[in-house]
Amino acid sequence: MRKHILIDCDPGVDDTIALLMAFASDKLNIVGLTTVFGNNSVDVTTKNALILNEFFNLKTVVHKGASKGLFIPNKNFGDFHGKNGMGNVDFNSPVSVESGEYAWDAIYREAKKYNGELTIVTLGPLTNVAIALFKYEDLNQYVKEIIMMAGTTTTGNERPFSEANVVSDPHAMQVVLNSGISLTMIGLNATETTRMNEEEHDVMLDKKEDILPEVRGMLRHYKNIQNTLGSAGMVIHDAAAMFAVIEPDSAESEMFNVDVEL
């Protein structure tokens, strides 16, 4: 039976690759996308999700979510994913229309619909999920699990020991950690093990018949920006997390008590 998932995301180069992996899998039933600030403003990440929906004919529903963290001001989004959030690549695509339903309301509605069988996969800050938990106190009864690309048990990327999705809204992370829902945290300590070296990256992008030029352009930007910041090769964090969602036997997990330092 296919796993029912809702993907909360902030596209984003690595989000884009993760989404394409998810929609290509016959093991997942994707009930919708919710968008959040993170890699860029929520207006930009929502537009990007709508572009991807149209360009790749994903046939899904996009629900716009939070524009900032629960208690902290908006961050400077920088240029890691390009000014348009897509590696400065122009998809030259029509934009589909968002649902008009808030992300947190969609999360609750889908959770009730699937009545304990819905997995929420988060690829950005956890603000939408936290708001849903605040607004709907019984949400934890209807969600099977949350799998999140968030956190780290080793070194960070936003700060020496902090990961970007958590830094963007640590209070939301705390709410989710205390929700009582089954949680799987796929942190930088896990995603970094999938880092491609220069040769592997070049071999992948040279397969022109397998990769659209738009996707190739995004990945080249993503690698170049990582190299500029001192990282060799390239790691696609959200894609690594999504692979573990699609193929759970590919990853080993351990139980820990986890907290966030505010």
Image (cartoon, rainbow, N blue to C red):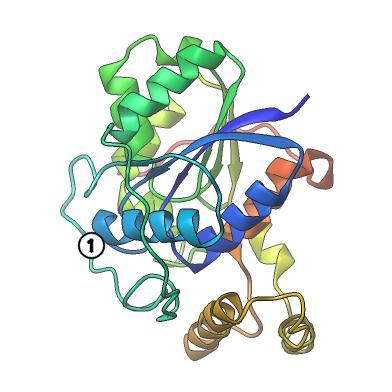
Left or right side of 156 for 193? right
- Between 136 and 189, the one lying in front of the other is 136
* 210 over 229 or under it: above or below: above
Which residue is identified by label 1?
75
Residue type at the position of mark 1: Lys
Label 1 Cα crowd, 10 Å radius (few <14 / some 14-19 / many 20+): some
Look at 33% across and 58% down and name the residue there. 47
Provide residue 106's location: percent of width, then percent of height.
Answer: 37, 27
At x 40%, y 19%, the residue is: 109
The residue closer to the viewer here, 76 or 82, is: 82
Q: Residue 60, image x and y in percent?
A: 50, 41
Secondary element under disc 1, as helix, strand or loop, is loop
Seen from the viewer's position, the closer of residues 147 and 56 is 56
74 above or below 30?
Answer: below
Q: State which quadrant residue 56 falls in.
A: bottom right
At 37% from the left and 63% from the top, the residue drawn is: 39
Give left or right: position of 69 versus 86.
left
Does residue 222 appear in the picture of this structure?
A: yes
Residue 256, image quadrant = top right
- Horizontal side of residue 44 vs 226, given as left or right: left
Work out which residue is located at the far right of the displayed protein and give it.
249
Residue 14: percent from left, percent from top: 54, 64
